[in-house]
Image (spheres, rainbow, N blue to C red):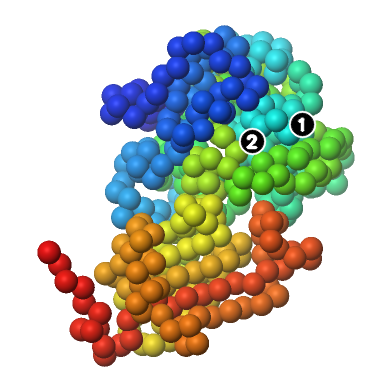
C-alpha cells in the first residue's frame, strides 16, 4: 500500500492520533509523539507530518501483511528477485521547485541536537547499473546542503569512494514518504543493489520506479530531493542513536541538492531517534539473518531482537533441541549473523519469545550459571554501544535456558 494508504489504514483501525493544532518542528512534535503511538500532525510549519508509523510490531506486520509469529521465517524465505518496473510518470512529480529545506518541516528532536535532521529519507544511488537504497541520518547545513552519515564499508560509502576515484560526483535522490513495506525492505540486509528487488518480492508485485532529472530512479513517494555527493565534507553530529545516547561528531560527506519534487500537499515522514520505529527498522531486518544462521546448526523455530535491548543488542532464539550442544551452536551462529549482538538467550518451543516474563522464567528455572552461560571476551562490538571499549571490543554472553534432554517432564508447567 502507499504511504498515504497506510496512514488511512491506521486511522480506520483506530491506531492513529491526529493533532490539528500548530506544532513546532523544534522539540515540540518529538515531545508530543514520545508515547510511541502513530501520529499525524496536520500543521507543522504548514505541512502534514507522520511520526511513529512503524513503531510497533503490530504496525509492521500490518504493513507487511504477515503475522508476528511468522515474521522472521517469512522474511528469511523471501528472495531479492522481484521485478522493478520503470514508469514514465508519478504523483511525486506533481510539483517541482528549487531545493529549499526551510520549506520542509524537518525536525530538531532534542535540545542538544546541532541542527534539524532528516531521519526517514531513503538515499538512492546508482552506479554501473546497480541501484542502491539505504536510510541515512542527514543533518541540515543550509537550504540546499545536508551532511549524511555514511558508514564504512557499506554500499553508499563505497559507491561515493568509487565515484571520487573516477573523478566524478555521485548522483543521489532522497525519497521521503514511501510505502512502509518498501521502507522496511530498504533496511533489510540483502546483497548490494537488491533492495528494490527484495521490496518487490515482499509486496508480491512489481515495484514501480520513475526517473529523476539526474537519472536516479526512485519509487513513488511523497517528496524527492535530487542532488549529488562530491568531495566536500562537514562536521555531522552529535546525534541521538538507538540507545537514546548521543553518538560522536564525525566529518561526513556533503550532499548538494539541485532539485525538489513532491506531491501536492505532501505528507512528510519523521523517525524519532531512539524511538520504536527507529529501533524496529534497524533491528528487525537482522532477525531473518539470525534465524537462517541458527537453522544451519540446529532446529531453529523463531528469533526476536528484544525491545529492552534496543531491538539490536539482545536476542532470544527459540530452538527444538536435539543434542546438548545445540544451544551453544545456536548462540555462536547468532553472534556470527549479527556482529553487533551482545547477549543471546536460547529457549525451548514452549517459551513465548515475545514475553520478557516468560523468557526470564526460563532463565530462572532452567539455567545453572556454571554450566549454561557462555562468555566471549575481547570481540568486535558495536560503535552504538556506549559500554564498548575504546578499540570497539566488547564481551558477549550466551545463556542456554533450555531444558536438559531427558528431563523434559520435570519442567512441564501446569495449565489452567
Label 2 environment density (alpha carbons within 10 Å; few <14, some 14–19, many ≥20): many
Give x and y (percent) for residue 345: 45, 70
Residue 96 as seen in the image, left or right of residue 353: right
Place residue 256 in its image quadrant: top right
- Front tag of 1 and 2: 1
Asked which secondary structure carries label 2, the reply is strand
- Residue 292 screen position, x and y as percent: 44, 66
* Residue at point 68%, 69% (across, down): 394
Instruction: Report whether 385 appears left or right of 196.
Output: right
- Whether residue 389 is visible here, answered yes or no, is yes
Q: What's the distance in space between the residues labelled 1 and 2, CA to CA?
A: 21 Å
Q: Residue at x 64, y 72 (%)?
A: 395
Q: In this orientation, which residue lies closer to the viewer: 72 or 191?
A: 72
Query: What residue is shown with label 2?
Result: 123
* 409 shown above or below 214: below
Depth check: give the residue in front, 80 or 20.
20
Quadrant of residue 304 within the rendered picture? bottom left
Q: Local crowd at mark 1 within 10 Å, few (<14), some, or many (≥20)?
A: some
Q: Which residue is mark 1?
A: 114
Tell me whether the residue at label 1 lies in contact with that at label 2, contact meaning CB atoms closer than 8 angstroms: no
Query: Horizontally, is 398 left or right of 167 in the view?
Result: left
Dot placed on the residue nearer the N-terminal end, 1 or 2: 1
Mark 1 secondary-structure assignment:
loop
User: Can you give x and y, in whole percent of width and height, for residue 188 in the image?
Assistant: 52, 50
Which part of the image, by quadrant, shows the N terminus? Answer: top left
Q: Nearer the viewer, residue 126 or 58?
A: 58
Give residue 81's mark.
Answer: none
- Looking at the picture, does residue 127 appear above or below residue 302? above
Q: Could you say which quadrant of the image residue 223 lies in?
A: top right
The quadrant of the rendering that contains the C terminus is bottom left
Amino acid at each position: 500500500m502507499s504511504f498515504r494508504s497506510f496512514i488511512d489504514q491506521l486511522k480506520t483501525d483506530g491506531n492513529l492520533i491526529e493533532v490539528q493544532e500548530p506544532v513546532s518542528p523544534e522539540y515540540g512534535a518529538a515531545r508530543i509523539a514520545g508515547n510511541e503511538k502513530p501520529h499525524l500532525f496536520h500543521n507543522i510549519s504548514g505541512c502534514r507530518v507522520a511520526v511513529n508509523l512503524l513503531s510497533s510490531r503490530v504496525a509492521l506486520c500490518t504493513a507487511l501483511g504477515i503475522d508476528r509469529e511468522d515474521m522472521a521465517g517469512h522474511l528469511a524465505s523471501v528472495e531479492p528477485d522481484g521485478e522493478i518496473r520503470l514508469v514514465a510518470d508519478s504523483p511525486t512529480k506533481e510539483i517541482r521547485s528549487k531545493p529549499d529545506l526551510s520549506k520542509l518541516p524537518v525536525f530538531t528532536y532534542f535540545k542538544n541536537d546541532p541542527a534539524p535532521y532528516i531521519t526517514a529519507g531513503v538515499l538512492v544511488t546508482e552506479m554501473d547499473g546497480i541501484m542502491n537504497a539505504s536510510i541515512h541520518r542527514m543533518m541540515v547545513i543550509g537550504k540546499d546542503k545536508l551532511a549524511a552519515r555514511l558508514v564504512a564499508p557499506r554500499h553508499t560509502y563505497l559507491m561515493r569512494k568509487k565515484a571520487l576515484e573516477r573523478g566524478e560526483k555521485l548522483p543521489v535522490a532522497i525519497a521521503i514518504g514511501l510505502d512502509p513495506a518498501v521502507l522496511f525492505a530498504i533496511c533489510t540486509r540483502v546483497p548490494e543493489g537488491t533492495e528494490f528487488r527484495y521490496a518487490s518480492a515482499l509486496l508480491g508485485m512489481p515495484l514501480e520506479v520513475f526517473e529523476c532529472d539526474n537519472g536516479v530512479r526512485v519509487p513513488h513517494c511523497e517528496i524527492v530531493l535530487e542532488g549529488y555527493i562530491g568531495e566536500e565534507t562537514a562536521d555531522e553530529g552529535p546525534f541521538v542513536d538507538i540507545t537514546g545516547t548521543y553518538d560522536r561528531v564525525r566529518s561526513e560527506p556533503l550532499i548538494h541538492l539541485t532539485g525538489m519534487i513532491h506531491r501536492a500537499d505532501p505528507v512528510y515522514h519523521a523517525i524519532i531517534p531512539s524511538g520504536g520505529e527507529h529501533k524496529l527498522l534497524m533491528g528487525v531486518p537482522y532477525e531473518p539473518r539470525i534465524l537462517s544462521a541458527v537453522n544451519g546448526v540446529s532446529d531453529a523455530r523463531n528469533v526476536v531482537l528484544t525491545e529492552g535491548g534496543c531491538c539490536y543488542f539482545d536476542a532470544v532464539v527459540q530452538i527444538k533441541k536435539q543434542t546438548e550442544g545445540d544451544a551453544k551452536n545456536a548462540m555462536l551462529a547468532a553472534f556470527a549473523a549479527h556482529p553487533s549482538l551482545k547477549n543471546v538467550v536460547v529457549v525451548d518451543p514452549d517459551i513465548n519469545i515475545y514475553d520478557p516474563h516468560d523468557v526470564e522464567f526460563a532463565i530462572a528455572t532452567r539455567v545453572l550459571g556454571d554450566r549454561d552461560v557462555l562468555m566471549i571476551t575481547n570481540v568486535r562490538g558495536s560503535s552504538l554501544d556506549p559500554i564498548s571499549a575504546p578499540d570497539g571490543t566488547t564481551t558477549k554472553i550466551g545463556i542456554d535456558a533450555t531444558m536438559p534432554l531427558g528431563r523434559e517432564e520435570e519442567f512441564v508447567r501446569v495449565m489452567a
